Image: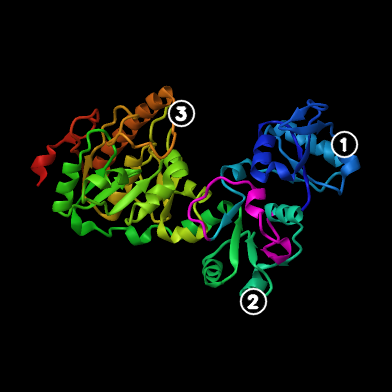
Amino acid sequence: MKKVVLIGAGNIGKQALECLGAEFIEYFIDNNKAGQNYLEKSVYSINKIIEDQGKYLFLLTIAHIQYREELMDQLNRMGIKDYYYFEQAIYMGNIFQRFDVQVYTKKSLYEDMIGIDPKRVCVLGRERRIGRFIANLLEIENFYDETEFYVEYRLTDKYDYLFVNVKNYNSELHNRLKESNIKVYYIAHYYNFYNYLVRKGFKEFSGKYKERKRCFIVGNGPSLVSEDLDVLAEHNEFCIGSNMIHKMYSKTKWRPNYICICDKLVISQNLNHILENNNSPVFVNDAVRLYLSPFQYDNAILYHEAFNRDDDYRIVRFGTELSDGSIPSGWTVTYIAIELAIYMGFEEIYLLGIDNSNLAKHCCDDYWSESSVQKDQSEDELQLIVFGHAYKRVKAASIEFGFKIYNATRGGCLEEFERVNFDELF
């Protein structure tokens, strides 16, 4: 295995060291910090690169565009053209996404590579630079092009591992990988998986439940009680649950027809618990691609949360045509769930457990016990303002598109919709 020189001893350099593993890092280059130590690694001026050219891999870890371009010009003038650029987005997930792990614990590349013999590895695809960097780093010499893989995709006699580095992922390749017996690792798969997944779209859900007429969207507010959920189960009401609604399952026989998740904190820190505790299909924000194994996507329904507000935080669009898998954001999972319900064909929407008040309180005391999520109070205040804009947009959409929406929540602060007595609905 080769060593890496990180060019830039700042926050991005720190992220790169953590992502790759300190074991891979030889030293830092930073003209402003030369002669110092950073993260227990020596820091040198850029001239050090000249004497070590060809000995190490060079990885550019500078976030500021101006500084990065200046340094790239300097490297080119020095005759250094063989270097890579660390994409900050890689840091949000693991470089490797293994086929046999459902939800990922953050690990370094070095930790992931323990026990893997590079001679028994084949890289599928040559185009993406991240894959070439990994191959050079680990000194992997075996490459297959995509066309070669289609001809000979059972490679177990030659290799133990296949590192997927293709530029354009498609359903044929996806299915063949599932059929093969070789151990599959995806190199930063979240860069190309979304394009494949979004093409699957939502067409099958268009008008799917129009005979059911009404739908309950169940939030996680402190007003939600298990007795009301039992009533929904008793009357076989169609329900879309939100985020970590599984926290209520121990108190009720009720289960939602679908789960909807959009909060990235929930996804990053609690997705494994949600998937483990739900048999219901889960609509989940495509941020999941950073944490979920590619072979597990078949068990979740991914959507793209499209940017949807103006400079004053007003919500602009309400989506009724979602066939391409893109849903306009409302900053709240309830907004997404309402759009889904209308797309599915429901004419009446009832909100339950959506208090729109104190975002720190939920339907059960241990709601955040599975993670240490902390939110700034000012952020909560801003969210409530945006939520208010979102609900006003929903009300306008109900008039524009002819659906009805009612608030059946017991108490709370959501007054944008006509209130109804939950007990009188049955």
Residue 48 sits in quarter: top right
The crowding category of the residue bearing disc 1, from other C-alpha atoms within 10 Å (few below 14, some 14 to 19, many at least 20), is few
Q: In the structure shown, which secondary structural element does the residue marked by tag 2 occupy? A: loop
Name the residue type under label 3. Asp
User: Does residue 362 lie above or below 304 as drawn?
Assistant: above
Location of residue 254 in the rendering, given as x and y in whole percent from the top left corner: 22, 50
Name the residue type under label 1. Lys
Residue 124 colored magenta? yes
Q: Nearer the viewer, residue 121 or 352?
A: 121
The crowding category of the residue bearing disc 2, from other C-alpha atoms within 10 Å (few below 14, some 14 to 19, many at least 20), is few
Question: Which residue does the numbered mark 2 point to in the structure image?
Answer: 152
- CA distance for labels 3 and 1: 47 Å
Asked whether disc 3 touches disc 1, contact meaning CB atoms under 8 Å apart, the reply is no
Q: Give the magenta range.
A: 100-128
Q: Residue 48 bears which disc, if any? A: 1
Residue appearing at x 29%, y 31% in the figure = 356
